[in-house]
């Protein structure tokens, strides 16, 4: 009998406060409406773009002319950090920040070697020959690298940014707005 009495108390509590629960559910539905979710997602994209654009020394639209992927031992020969690295030789189409010249090589962690993809569980971008991309590069003493690894490359497919779904024209307009 004691158990039944406990459940009746709990049910009574829900019955007593059901109008609050319905109000909470209604408010939650308003917050999670498609328009609000879209606005939230767009603000996240803008924040991310703002962050990587400010950190980058070079922001350019490129076409990958040539790549070379190999194992690289970082930290000297005694180091145990053996990474897959890709050296990318771009053809620069347009730069919005910095001066990246044609055939100025930059490096990226990860890549494709002997048919296997090494991307650090999605952490590193993978460059492919003849692909177009917008790259956000940072200058380091060791050379140029993509900013924040995977966020340093936005792949262009059929005049659309693959990672965001934006048209190239809209993305460039947003990028120029961030850079002003």
Image: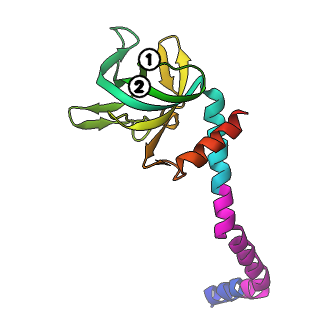
Drawn side of residue 131 relative to residue 159, left or right:
left
Mark carried by residue 90:
2
Give residue 103's position: percent from left, percent from top.
Answer: 41, 18
Give residue 94's position: percent from left, percent from top.
Answer: 53, 30
Drawn side of residue 169 relative to residue 79, left or right:
right
User: Circles 1 and 2: CB distance less than 8 Å?
Assistant: yes
Q: Marks 1 and 2, how far apart in space?
A: 7 Å
Verify whether residue 27 appears in magenta. yes
- Residue indicated by mark 1: 104
Identify the magenta region. Answer: 12-40
Which circle's residue, 1 or 2, is located before the other in the chain? 2
| Residue 48 visible to the viewer | no
45 to 91, vertically: above or below: below
Verify whether residue 57 appears in magenta. no
Give residue 100's position: percent from left, percent from top.
Answer: 52, 20
Q: SS of the residue at dot 1?
A: loop
The crowding category of the residue bearing disc 1, from other C-alpha atoms within 10 Å (few below 14, some 14 to 19, many at least 20), is: few
């Amino acid at each position: 009998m004691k158990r039944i009495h406990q459940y009746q108390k709990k049910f009574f509590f829900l019955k007593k406060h059901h109008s609050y629960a319905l109000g909470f559910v209604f408010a939650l539905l308003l917050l999670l409406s498609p328009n609000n979710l879209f606005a939230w997602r767009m603000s996240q994209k803008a924040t991310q773009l703002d962050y990587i654009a400010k950190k980058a020394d070079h922001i350019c639209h490129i076409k990958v002319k040539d790549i070379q992927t190999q194992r690289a031992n970082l930290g000297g020969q005694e180091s145990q950090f053996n990474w897959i690295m890709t050296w990318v030789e771009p053809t620069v189409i347009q730069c919005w920040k910095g001066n990246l010249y044609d055939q100025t090589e930059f490096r990226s962690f990860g890549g494709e070697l002997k048919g296997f993809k090494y991307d650090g569980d999605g952490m590193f971008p993978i460059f492919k020959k003849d692909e177009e991309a917008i790259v956000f590069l940072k200058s380091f003493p060791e050379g140029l690298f993509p900013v924040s690894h995977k966020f340093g490359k936005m792949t262009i497919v059929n005049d659309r940014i693959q990672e965001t779904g934006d048209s190239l024209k809209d993305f460039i307009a947003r990028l120029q707005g961030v850079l002003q």
